[in-house]
């Protein structure tokens, strides 16, 4: 009998503008609904100009049965610096926070602590910068923030913007492993595994994948990726 798992997905929506240059939030939501995920971390969910209204309308998301992680009261945006998180209706949120990140470009991360089918889970969603130096600083700030919180099984998910091996980011992620995911960018012919997950040692990825079904290859310049997360099995204790 296999251990219970939870599917978490990450998807850069490109502000719901597809490769046909049409803004189709309904198409983006159609892709999200086909991922089979209980938690979906999103990037580029808001339009670029202030007051940065949501490119993926909140009402449309909630009508589809998702709950949106609440970060700011009365905000026109869906999240924070374009980062948002959708959760299945049965998922209970116990903490929601925003994290400011350093860098030349405005960047941030969002954090949720949730009760799930595999137990309490902390999920951080982020979209790291285009310059590697700032990606490292941003990951270091996320890790510093996590160290200030009580220990909990944690997933960092998002667009890491790293074309090279994830080992290039290890210097900033002590105690958390960036796992292998299939290439997700550019959507028509994926070459770069930019969209990633990182797990604390008490978690493991039973499976990972990307969604390539219609209309994912045209809905954004990224394909969504997913991971089935389970609790890591503890090694047997040695007999005295």
Image: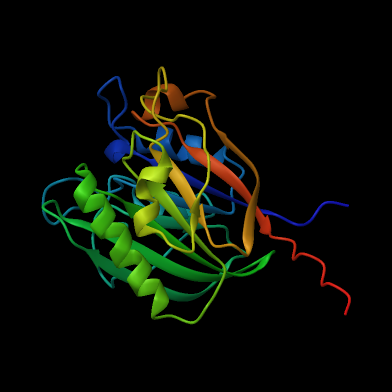
**Residue located 43% across and 80% down the image:** 149
The single residue placed furthest to the front in the displayed view is 240
**Residue located 28% across and 73% down the image:** 73
User: Is 152 placed left or right of 128 in the picture?
Assistant: right
Q: Name the foreground residue: 6 vs 232.
A: 232
Residue 66 rendering spot, x and y as whole percentages:
51, 55
Residue 236 rendering spot, x and y as whole percentages:
82, 67
In this picture, is 98 found above or below 180? below
In this picture, is 147 found above or below 142? below
In this picture, is 95 found above or below 80? below
In this picture, is 70 found above or below 2? below
What is the total number of numbered labels drawn onto the structure image?
0
The quarter in which the C terminus is drawn is bottom right
Residue 47 rendering spot, x and y as whole percentages:
20, 45
Q: Name the foreground residue: 104 vs 166.
A: 166
User: Is 102 placed left or right of 11 in the picture?
Assistant: left
Residue 142 rendering spot, x and y as whole percentages:
34, 65
Let me know if residue 71 appears in the view.
Answer: no
Report the coloring of the rendering. Answer: rainbow
Let me know if residue 73 appears in the view.
Answer: yes
**Residue located 36% across and 38% down the image:** 25
């Amino acid at each position: 009998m296999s251990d219970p798992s939870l599917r978490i997905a990450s998807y850069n929506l490109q502000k719901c503008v597809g490769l046909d240059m049409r803004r189709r939030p309904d198409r983006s939501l159609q892709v999200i609904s086909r991922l089979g995920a209980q938690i979906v971390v999103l990037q580029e969910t808001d339009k670029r100009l202030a007051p940065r209204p949501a490119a993926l309308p909140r009402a449309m998301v909630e009508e589809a049965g998702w709950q949106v992680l609440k970060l700011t009261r009365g905000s026109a945006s869906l999240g924070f610096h374009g980062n948002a998180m959708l959760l299945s209706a049965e998922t209970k949120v116990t903490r929601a926070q925003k994290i400011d990140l350093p860098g030349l470009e405005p960047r941030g991360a969002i954090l949720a602590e949730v009760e799930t089918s595999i137990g309490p889970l902390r999920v951080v969603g982020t979209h790291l910068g285009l310059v590697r130096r700032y990606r490292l600083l941003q990951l270091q700030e996320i890790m510093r923030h996590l160290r200030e919180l009580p220990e909990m099984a944690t997933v960092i998910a998002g667009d890491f913007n790293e074309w090279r091996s994830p080992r290039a980011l290890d210097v900033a992620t002590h105690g958390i492993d960036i796992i292998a995911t299939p290439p997700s960018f550019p959507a028509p012919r994926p070459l770069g595994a930019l969209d990633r997950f990182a797990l604390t040692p008490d978690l493991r990825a039973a499976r990972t994948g990307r969604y390539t079904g219609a209309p994912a290859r045209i809905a954004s310049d990224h394909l969504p990726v997913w991971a089935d997360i389970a609790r890591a099995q503890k090694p047997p204790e040695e007999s005295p």
